[in-house]
Amino acid sequence: MVLNPPEQLRFDLSIIASWISNDSRVLDLGCGHGDLLAWLKQHKNIQGTGIEQNKEKAASCIERGLTVLQGDLKDEVQDYPDGFFDVVILSQTLQQVYQPDELLKSLARIGKQVIVSFPNFSHFSIRRQLLLKGQAPKSRELPFSWYDTPNIRVITLDDFRKFSRDVGYTIVKECAINTHDQDRKGKIVSFLSNLRATYGIFLIEKKQIL
Amino acid sequence: MKIRKKLFTYKVAEAKQVLDSGLQLDSITIAYETIGVLNETGDNAILICHAFSGDSHVAGFYEEDSNEENPGWWEFMVGPGKGIDTDKYFVICCNILGSCMGSTGPSSINPATDKPYGLDFPMVTIGDMVHAQKEVLDHLGIKCLHSVIGGSVGGMQVLEWCVRYPAMIKSAIPIATTMRHSALAIAFNEVARQAIMVDPQWNKGDYYQQHAPDLGLSVARMIGHVTYLSDEAMRRKFGRKQQNNKDFSFNFEANFQVESYLRYQGSKFAARFDANSVLYISKAADYFDLADDVNTQESLQDLQGNHLKFLVISFTSDWLYPTYQAKELVKALKRTGQDVSFCEIEADCGHDAFLIQDSRLSNLLGGFLDGIEST
């Protein structure tokens, strides 16, 4: 096996990994080079699938023995049977999705639970930039200019809580963290999280219709 | 790496093989080659299925080829330390039923008449070809395949293997292929067949005692060859470049390099391949349709009940079996819950890209094969 998972996951991914049960079937959307999937396969014996748009990244996943589909995530989530995955992970991708509501509906169909993480746009440093400089904010989490950013959605933790409810999800678990882009270290933020957290991670599931 | 072509002949009655057409051959010979060593547990065998006009000579050199002038058709992919590593795997490649490179086909002797079959040869399908390969594997004592791999018509055989014998397969790599031909692909094949059949030398398939329909076969290959290339590849290779940089001759000589290239490819092919085999194999490819089987076969599983692992590969510039057809296959496999990976490779050389050296393709196959757990 050439799986070769990293010794230590990025801080936000390590929290996501801690929420995943052994032997579960996992779909990782926008899986990059497949570090999370490789780690979960090694340590939690999951059956994992990844979806990755970038051809080189998708190929590098397949080369390490992971099951990965190269393609657009809104198309690739379509054909799986209902409830096929125990968990679907959408890590730091929601802010780049064109139709997030449609995507979350699709994920509710194929996954029993969905984990979503994204950079928090209401962090005080972002608020300060907009307030004092009057320019579109940049941060280590969102480093692009308005004209070249792939992050077409600005989301705050409060926005996501409301959005989840509106599209019919229940929030099972949530975790606000303070960490930087590629860091393996970070802190969990429990006080004034909408202001102080750089990222939010949510575990949501579709409300059961009684 | 020295390789020997071997022949295996079996009596069809003993194998109880009825062709999909309902007809039966008396006996079938399949030419095959093997590379590497079958391990003690017998779980390191990989079957490679060749494309339309290929043969069993997948890699290495024949003993009699002392100057090593004729490598196998997938030399860059198959061998010690390569993508399909013959230090690890025991590789088998069979010439397909209906071909003319050692296996039984329309140019073989019909035992009933002691003359070549010609059109008396029964129509064979991709399924019939796969059945004959299974007989070879039984003969070799192979009960389990680590993987079945093939491009184009070889990819069709891969899919047929998965549907017919899922229990003996761990993984499958269909490359640049389709679950069924589009109208475009059938149309190209029909033009090729008509080119052969309108050649007076074809003589309703009965030409083995006289001149073969080489002109018709050349034209058939010319159209085939265009479908294996791409607009980009032809623009890059030929553009409007003229032969010998001369002015136009204002007649029908080959002025453009692309004309001269196609004529050369056509006549080279006519010298090595049988026209009737083109008719039979092209029809088999046109008849092939596994869409219903792949869409409905609930779970393709091996003997241990594990899902087969699929790696589907397409190429951006393949206009014979474009990426959308590979995606249809991927969708069908997803719907039935298979373990499927897919990658489209950026390549401008068209359908034939899988035959052209590319480390991306070798690395993909190598990593995928290493990740398949053995029993």
Image: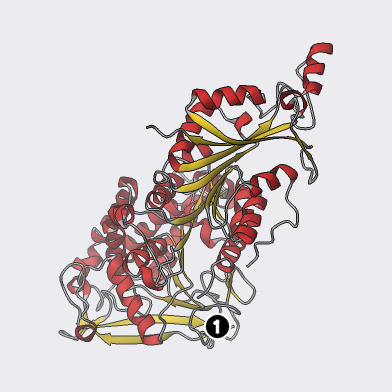
Specify the color scheme.
Answer: secondary structure
Label 1 sits on a secondary structure element that is: loop
Residue B238 in sight: no
How many labels, in total? Answer: 1
Q: Chain of mark 1?
A: B
- Count neighbours of disc 1 (C-alpha within 10 A) and say few if under 14, some if 14 to 19, many if 20 or more: some
Measured as percent of width and height from the top left, residue B38 is found at: 51, 84
Which one is nearer the viewer's eye here, A45 or B221? A45
Tell whether B260 sits left or right of A191. left
Tell whether B137 sits left or right of A76. left
Which one is nearer the viewer's eye here, B193 or A4? A4
Tell whether B250 sits left or right of A1. left
Q: Looking at the image, is B37 positioned above or below residue B173?
A: below
Q: Looking at the image, is B229 positioned above or below residue B303?
A: above
Q: Quadrant of the N terminus of chain B?
A: bottom right
Which one is nearer the viewer's eye here, B183 or A181? A181
Residue B370 in sight: yes
Which one is nearer the viewer's eye here, B68 or B153? B153
Q: Looking at the image, is B49 positioned above or below residue B17?
A: above
As drawn, the residue found furthest toward the right would be A132
Q: Amino acid at mark 1?
A: Gly
Residue at screen point 32% across, 81% down = B135
Measured as percent of width and height from the top left, residue B98 is found at: 30, 72
Measured as percent of width and height from the top left, residue B342 is found at: 51, 52
Tell whether A118 sits left or right of B241. right
Which residue in the structure is indicated by mark 1?
B36
Residue at screen point 68% across, 44% down = A15
Q: Looking at the image, is A78 positioned above or below residue B255?
A: above
